[in-house]
Image: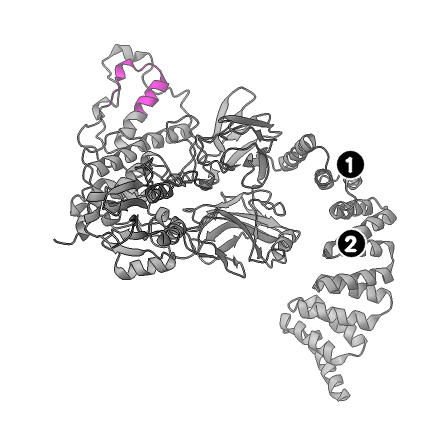
């Protein structure tokens, strides 16, 4: 990640290891690694000393690697990498641009600091850097740039993240000296080409590109705006998404973007109620992140690829809800970003669960300069932590997250010293830490609600409590966790809902969710109990009515199943699945006329092949063969490649002496089986009949 | 440099691609309009040699800045005013004396750290005091913004 440092000239590194005092294999290894690290930095390894002196009798104890207990291979590689990134800290006295500064800027800055990207100016050439030398020195010294909130290497709570974009202490030192020593260009012979970046979509043309129908105009001045936009995916079946990319179009305005899913058309309603494109709100409560990923974009993030084996699900008929954090620039700005989705061919091999730690009540007195909230969560199963996304608003200051294993070991997950809402991001672990069942994940967040905090939105400070508005506070971690055993998913979900139950008291939604877990496990009686409780708390919870109906049907209690299916359809008349379930039960009861009625209503909602097919079956049962034939014809037309559908429709139409339409179906069937003699005979006959009719 | 019969002139150093200066555009425009009838003229100063008259005109149009613009690619005014960043304001009285130099207000606490609303409008306070003949309490503040290079870039410096 970090660039290779300029060759060190003034003080050649010395290997400060005396092999004579090496006693244990552990020391032997660390000495070897230190040597290798220097090699990685371009120094000459002191070859003569690589092997311990054979003449020295003191070495007899164990100077050589202890072959019985070699260090794990992983640890060795990691240590070598660590050292090579942490090369001897010597900055040239008068660094120059071409040799020393350009490699740093090109690696850490140019991705955003180039034309049409988020940054306000380019850092590609000497002239670019020269003009901003003083500013570069200042913002790198204060660690405002490159924007990276977690602890830096060497600081308390440092964790290595795959998407790290921090610069090293040496790099910062070089930039300071360059600004102070006249910002020289250096030898032209050392000049290197500016880096190039792929144009357009980073991963090629996406499988699905979404954008909002209308352009939103951000006002020239005022406070930051949080605006949500509904993107219609048009997906008729569920898809797995392996990667996604956000292209802001107007990069300087969009500070970050979060993508959520809405399965219930709630966000559409909110958008419809707002006269301008989109709708306002920092966190709309209508939509949710997919169950197994957190989708966030920040400037500088390219395409967001899931770790190997992980994908998130885009459910059928779900909308994407794009939440944008917009910063006024001084002039009106057009906002219309695009989202590209890349689908996976197959279901992912790993299933992740989003752990949520935090969301405890917050009540910060006005003026309090250090107010802590704490939370913890005990893992019910073992697994690995892939990523962490911390969330808080403007007053939060320090964020700490760590895991305590049952054996007492402490594993840092995240440490942010000075939280900045503007640069929130998801942090992906370079090597996902493994945690055993029973490990406790701890979260601590401090808030500064004093007037000395310039980020405080209230002057003078006021009492602040938890809530979704930007003047409220929040504090939570979304942690992407992959259980070692996929069966652990249902335990994780159950523990999540049990926690919600314990915290917020029983709500209809939580009880419904617990019912779903039991349903998935096949525990019908428990599922029934949860759904019934959910309905006791909220009789209008149509999801609970629906699923209770599913359970009762499996338990052969058809009359009660019918009652709840009807109620679900009554409460959510626009939901196709409610009518599907109702029709299922009518069919199970053998009530064919009722089934016909319900399926006709269902067809009016969405005319898909499956419903035409079911309606045709029901119509045959009530003796309406001609109408059944019409629906079979629709199935055949909607599924032109389905051989069986063509034949079934053709036969039914022929039975009703509807020769031309029957012919249409058999001719389509012939496309699938061009040589079928039986089909060809049938077609010949039908052609004759059609001719006779004329 | 000074506007003819104005009671005072305010020089605002800007740069077309400085996001901090640009974010101040609506504030600068409001101040320009507010003080024009009170005899205080605002002037925008562009220092970068690459900022051509056409580019300046386009910038003013885009950001709705109605104050007259001046170009100072040789940084002749910089030695007098000592400005280091954009945006920075310099209040000059009718006799050509610098009465205030610094930030417009305290909306920017640090790079990337904006207050929801400013708690102190330093430039306004200085102008009002000057117009009322009162003592200006704070004559100098630290402006936070995009640094002005010490001298024009060697590669693009005009030969003089």
x, y percent for residue B112: 40, 41
Report the chain holding disc 2. A
Query: Are labels 2 and 1 assigned to the same chain?
Result: yes
Sooner in the amino-acid sequence: mark 2 or mark 1: 1
Left or right of A290 in this view: A3 = left
Tag 1 secondary structure: helix
* Tag 1 subunit: A
Q: Which residues are magenta?
A: A15-32
x then y, percent, for residue A342 = 51, 53
Q: Are marks 2 and 1 in contact (CB under 8 Å)?
A: no
Q: Residue furthest left?
A: B160
Is residue A509 placed above or below A628 in the rendered structure?
above
- Please say whether residue A17 is one of the residues in the magenta stretch: yes
Prevailing secondary structure of the magenta residues: helix
Q: Residue at x 23, y 30 (%)?
A: A90
- Residue tagged by mark 1? A526
Q: Is residue B150 visible?
A: no
């Amino acid at each position: 990640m970090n660039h290779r440092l300029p060759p060190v000239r003034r003080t050649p590194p010395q290997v400060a290891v005396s092999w004579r005092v090496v006693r244990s294999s552990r020391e032997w290894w660390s000495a070897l690694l230190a040597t290798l690290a220097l090699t990685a930095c371009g120094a000459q390894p002191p070859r003569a000393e690589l092997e311990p002196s054979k003449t020295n009798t003191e070495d007899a104890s164990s100077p050589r690697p202890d072959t019985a207990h070699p260090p794990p291979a992983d640890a060795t590689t990691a240590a070598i990498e660590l050292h090579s990134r942490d090369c001897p800290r010597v900055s040239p006295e008068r660094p120059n641009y071409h040799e020393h500064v350009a490699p740093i800027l090109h690696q850490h800055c140019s991705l955003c600091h180039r034309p049409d990207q988020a940054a306000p100016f380019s850092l590609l050439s000497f002239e670019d850097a020269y003009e901003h030398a003083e500013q570069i020195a200042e913002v790198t010294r204060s660690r405002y740039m490159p924007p990276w909130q977690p602890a830096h290497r060497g600081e308390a709570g440092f964790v290595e993240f795959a998407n790290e974009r921090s610069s090293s202490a040496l790099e910062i030192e070089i930039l300071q000296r360059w600004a102070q020593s006249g910002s020289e260009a250096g030898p032209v012979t050392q000049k290197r080409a500016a880096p190039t970046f792929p144009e357009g979509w980073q991963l090629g043309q996406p499988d699905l590109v979404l954008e909002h129908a209308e352009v939103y105009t951000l006002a020239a001045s005022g406070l930051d705006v949080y605006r949500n936009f509904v993107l219609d995916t048009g997906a008729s079946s569920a898809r797995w998404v392996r990667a996604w990319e956000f292209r802001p179009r107007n990069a300087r305005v969009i500070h970050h973007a979060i993508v959520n899913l809405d399965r219930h058309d709630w966000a559409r309603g909110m958008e419809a109620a707002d006269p301008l494109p989109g709708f306002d709100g920092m966190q709309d409560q209508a939509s949710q992140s997919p169950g197994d990923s957190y989708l966030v974009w920040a400037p500088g993030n390219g395409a967001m690829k899931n770790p190997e084996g992980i994908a998130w699900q885009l459910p059928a008929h779900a909308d994407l809800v794009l939440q944008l954090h917009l910063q006024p620039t001084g002039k009106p700005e057009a906002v219309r970003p695009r989202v590209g989705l890349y689908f996976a061919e197959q279901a992912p091999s790993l299933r992740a669960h989003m752990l949520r730690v935090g969301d405890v009540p917050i009540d910060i007195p006005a003026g309090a300069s250090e107010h802590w909230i704490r939370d913890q969560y005990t893992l019910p199963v073992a697994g690995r932590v892939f990523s962490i996304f911390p969330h808080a608003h403007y007053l939060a200051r320090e964020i700490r997250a760590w895991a305590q294993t049952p054996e007492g070991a402490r594993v840092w997950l995240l440490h942010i010293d000075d939280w900045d809402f503007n640069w929130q991001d998801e942090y992906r672990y370079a090597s996902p830490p493994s945690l055993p069942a029973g490990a406790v994940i701890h979260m601590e967040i401090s808030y500064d609600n004093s007037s000395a905090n310039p980020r405080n939105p209230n002057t003078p400070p006021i009492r602040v409590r938890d809530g979704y508005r930007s003047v409220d506070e929040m504090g939570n971690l979304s942690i992407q966790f992959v259980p070692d055993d996929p069966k652990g998913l249902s335990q994780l979900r159950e523990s999540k809902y049990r926690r919600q139950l314990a915290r917020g008291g029983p709500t209809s939604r939580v009880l419904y969710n617990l019912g779903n877990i039991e349903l998935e496990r096949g525990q019908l009686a428990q599922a029934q109990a949860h759904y019934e409780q959910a309905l006791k708390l909220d009789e209008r919870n149509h999801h609970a009515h629906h699923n209770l109906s599913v359970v009762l049907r499996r338990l052969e209690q058809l009359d009660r199943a019918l009652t709840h299916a009807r109620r679900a359809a009554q409460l959510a008349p626009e939901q196709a699945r409610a009518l599907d379930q109702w029709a299922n039960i009518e069919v199970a009861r053998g009530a064919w006329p009722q089934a016909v009625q319900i399926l006709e209503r269902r067809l009016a909602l969405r005319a898909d092949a499956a419903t035409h097919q079911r309606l045709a079956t029901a119509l045959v049962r009530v003796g309406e063969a001609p109408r059944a034939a019409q629906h079979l014809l629709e199935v055949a037309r909607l599924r032109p490649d389905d051989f069986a559908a063509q034949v079934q429709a053709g036969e039914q139409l022929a039975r009703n002496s509807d020769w031309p339409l029957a012919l249409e179906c058999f001719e389509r069937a012939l496309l699938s089986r061009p040589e079928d003699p039986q089909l060809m005979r049938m077609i010949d006959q039908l052609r004759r009949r059609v001719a006779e009719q004329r | 440099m000074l506007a003819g019969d104005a009671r005072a002139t305010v020089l605002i150093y800007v740069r077309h691609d400085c996001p901090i200066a640009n974010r101040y555009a609506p504030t600068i425009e409001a101040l320009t309009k507010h003080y024009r009838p009170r005899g205080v003229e605002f002037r925008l100063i562009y220092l970068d040699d690459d900022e051509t008259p056409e580019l300046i005109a386009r910038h003013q149009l885009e950001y709705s800045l109605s104050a007259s613009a001046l170009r100072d690619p040789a940084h002749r005014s910089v030695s007098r005013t000592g400005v280091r960043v954009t945006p920075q304001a310099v209040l000059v009285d009718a006799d050509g004396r610098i009465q205030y130099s610094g930030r417009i207000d305290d909306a920017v606490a640090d790079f990337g750290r904006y207050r929801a609303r400013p708690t102190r409008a330093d430039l306004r306070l200085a102008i009002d005091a000057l117009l009322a003949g009162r003592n200006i309490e704070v004559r100098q503040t630290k402006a936070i913004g995009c640094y002005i290079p010490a001298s024009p870039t060697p590669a693009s410096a005009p030969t003089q």
